[in-house]
Amino acid sequence: MAERKDDSLLELFIFETLQNAQQLEKIILDTGAGDRFSEAAINEIFRIMHTVKGSAAMMSYSHISSLAHKIEDLFFYIRETPDAEYDIGTVSDFVLSFIDFINEEIEVIKSDGEQDAERAEELGKDVEKYLSMLKNEGQAEGAQAVKSAEAAKGVPAAAESAGYKVTLFFEDGCGMENIRAYAALLEIAEYAKIVSFIPADIEENDGSAEEIRKNGFTVYFESEASYDELQTRFENIPLVHEVVLTKAENEGVALDDTAMPAAEPDNRVKTEAKDQAEANTEIVAIPQAAEKAASQDGSQDSRKTEAHQPTQSIISVHVSKLDKLMNLVGELVIAESMVVENPDLKGMQLPSFQREAAQLHKIVDEIQELVMSMRLMPLATVFQRTNRIVRDMSRKLGKQVKLKITGEETEVDKNIIEHLSDPILHLVRNCVDHGIESREERIAAGKPEAGTISIEAYSAGSYVYIIVSDDGRGLDKQKILEKAMRNGLLKKSPESMTDKEIYNLIFLPGFSTSETVTEFSGRGVGMDVVMQSIGTIGGNVSVDSTPGQGTSIMMKIPLTVAIIDGMNVTVGDRLFTIPISNIRESFKPDLKNVFRDPDGREMVMVRGECYAIVRLHEIWGIETSVTELSDGILVMVEQEERRRCIFVDSLIGQQQVVVKSMPELIKRSKLAEGFAGCTLLGDGSISLIFDVSWLVSFDI
Amino acid sequence: MYTVLVVDDAAFMRLAIKNVLEKNEFKVVADAKNGVEAIQKYIEFKPDIVTMDITMPDMSGIDALKKIREYDPNAKIVMVSAMGQERMVKEAILNGAKNFIVKPYKEEHIVQTLRKVAAEN
């Protein structure tokens, strides 16, 4: 199993382990300020640790598994010792460090890197130390009693004179040999009279497993069955690897008294020490006696975890399959229009064909919608991680911060989620670090002591809006302007800029570098990175702020990136697609309003505002008969509040297009500059999709 | 060919066990992720053998074991446990579990165990 880590298994391991880590984190953070974990939380943590331990061991990640095991032990102790005096902060820190460790190790596993066994060991030792400290405090006496009891037991005097003697050896590495021996004993008891067995403390002392591994498990018993029959029976016990059966010399010696030499000390243990391990020490070689122990165990085990997992009819599907399906549906959409708009059909009267085509279109549309909805995931996965950041940072910075999350059930495409996580975490970090003032400052400003950060998400149309805001000090316009000026980012005179324009400066690449974090009291650390990641998924970011009252940053994100609404346009014999979401308007320019600015750039005036004109045929050297503005059409595009008018020959029409990324070779060359991808149109021709953010920002 | 119901709350373990079994003469006819499901699936599929995880949400493997054995006293259930669960395994055996395997198990161990348990009368 371990040698051959097949991929799907590994992926599932990673997936589930991360999920478990996330759930753990949620439990810890939900537990919050109390001084004890709830019973449900303990059970759940215990269960998760147990699962992680088992899975990791199966994958031979022994360091993860052993660390999980140690934390499991700790929670076992906490669970079984209701009055254990543990410090919830310390225990929470252990679990959180474990989660961090898991997250990092999974990254390592994914990238086939070096695993950090040392760290696991260190953390493990800390956990062990803490546990033994807890135990020492709680039950120094109890532990002592157990020890002396164990010492008193020893190996019972073996009764050599039984009818038979059998020694069973179990398979190497089968585990829990003492319990195996116990199971075998129960079975033997069905057809034989057990006289005695070695080691005798298989039930209560798990250390006896070691002895059985070495010397086997020996049972003396009396039976009427024949030697051969017995031999077969023993061989049929699962995982028995060797059976040494001998017929004893002195048959029939009554040995019932010596059969249970361990009984006495065991009972003593039970009365003297209430150690967790001893809760089950009812003695037995024979089932009837054990029934009692079982019912005891039962009551302890049947405490169910409260966290209900509703029985759900959900299956998990690999993302690559969904990606493929999405692609195929894209192809299907194209194929459909290739058939329906086939040039061969031009001019033909085909009423029944048209009717069926409409039906086909309806179905294809529905499939497309369904596939898209299958890829949606709630934002909760991203939002939840902010809890941790706020907790950690506010602790470190000594600020009080409340986090309010709304709309975490809002769903977006899986691909988009991946791009959202970093920007959101970044924004939240900024809020805690720079936005929220220190306690003293807040009190002086007459604000509540604890700052509030809210994260809000909602969807409208084919967009999702995510707003991260705080009630902190707000952005400092003056400082932003100074900084922008120093870095040469100001294109306009400061006086002519609106507040919004000034705030938007923080998104410019090069506006801030990490060294300015401390001196710049406002915001803007790496905001260009936020802008960039949101930009890659076709969204945009805007900021609003009121001095003294806070800042809010709004991200507008498309639900999906794979299929967009596009406007197809022509320039010469080329086809291009402009994302509809970027188009403000299109119009035939009035030549009266066209002029050149002092740098010789062609501009057009629309309702009192001037926009630069981008002549596509000139940029890409496309031959076209339409070179006069009056012959073509201007399309005003917008990205991040920057607008330009692009000049095209004509508009063909609006349609949904499936975005395909450019071939790798082209992507690497400069040729791809200005394009976000390409798409196949109904007639099989290729159309390039504009990257509007480039169109509005390149140097004319 | 024996039919098997695999019960484990971790999809990972379910797949791991299934992979091993299906390389041998076993057919995994159903799986379940908690005790409640296990009982339903047992009644529905009547498998020859059940592999039963112990620690699961909603209903533990031991409770499920008891319920299944109530429904079918001849049910052959093999517990899947981990180090540290000695008590529970013991309890399971007292309640009629046929045998058990310990995670991390060796492939041949699980196969041998199930084989022998399946062959029992």
Image (cartoon, coloured by chain):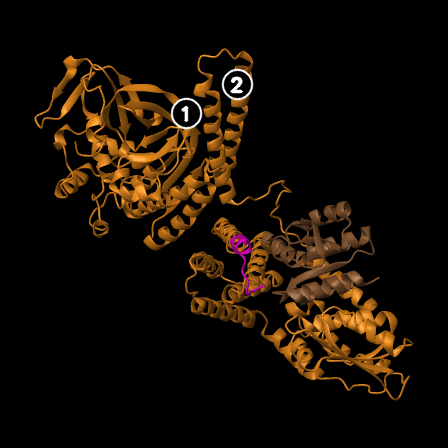
User: Which residue: 75% across, 47% down?
Assistant: B45
Which chain is the one coloured brown?
B
- Magenta-span inclusion, residue A300: no
Hue used for the chain lettered A: orange
The chain identifier of the residue carrying mark 1 reads A
- Give the magenta range: A1-12
Q: In this figure, what is the number of numbered marks?
A: 2
**Label 2, on which residue?**
A358
Q: Quadrant of the C terminus of chain A?
A: top left
The chain identifier of the residue carrying mark 2 reads A
Quadrant of the image occupied by residue A289: bottom right
Could you tell me which secondary element the residue under label 1 belongs to? loop
Q: Is residue A210 above or below residue A519?
A: below
Q: Is residue A360 above or below residue A1?
A: above
**Label 1, on which residue?**
A683
Q: Is residue A460 above or below residue A59?
A: above
